[in-house]
Amino acid sequence: MNPETEHAAEQQAEIESLRKKIEALDPSDEEAFLKIIEVIKRRSVILDSTEFKRVKELIRGEGQLIPPELDLAFLDQTQFQIYLNKNVFPEESLGEILEHEATELIHVVRATKGAKPDKQNWREAHQAALIREYRLAKQNGQLEEHHAWILGYLEKMKEGVYVNPEIAVMIDRQIHERTEAVEQILKEFNKPNSPP
């Protein structure tokens, strides 16, 4: 076997091993969940806008609802990779964004077991990811700043895609869901004996 073929086989074996771990994961086992999140985070790729657009169109095809130059990140479920557009987010939000994307990926893979995810799978995964993202932002002392940045980003995206009412509705829903998530996290952290 030549080195290139051997490397591809090793990568595929790693992906299959990760898929099996995710599918078998008990979501209440926080330690195991965090280990898988860390593996996925290490597999993430940060690209400039030009390369991000090229890779997104290569993987997802042209004609995406959200133009790649406005997109923050996308998931490649087949390779368990997160691609991030470094020209869109502030560096201090990287941890929260990765937490969100990795959580979403894990939840979708667990729910679908290899089948194509439907809208409900994505919505449930997104809700779980929002809570983890904002919880991490709160733990890092960045909740208000992170939330303000993400709302500004969503408004900018909405302006950039104003011709597509479907995306505008999706963005409005995201703004509402994110605001609710912040309120939930603030309540959670204000309870007696809550996490620091």
Image (cartoon, rainbow, N blue to C red):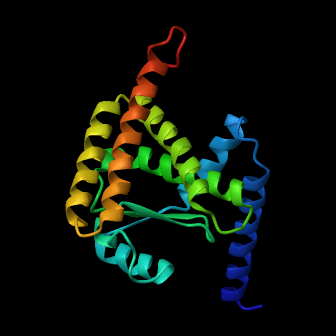
On screen, 194 above or below 163? above
Residue 160 in percent (x, y) is at 21, 65
Q: Nearer the viewer, residue 20 or 178?
A: 178
Let me know if residue 71 appears in the view.
no
Q: Is residue 121 left or right of residue 1?
A: left
Quarter holding residue 144: top left
For image coordinates 26% across by 39% down, the residue present is: 148
Tell me how many marks there are: 0
Q: Nearer the viewer, residue 146 or 152?
A: 152
Residue 85 in percent (x, y) is at 35, 64
For image coordinates 43% across by 45% down, the residue present is: 95
For image coordinates 71% across by 74% down, the residue present is: 12
On screen, 125 above or below 131? below
Most extreme residue toward the bottom is: 2
For image coordinates 40% across by 75% down, the residue present is: 64
Quarter holding residue 164: bottom left
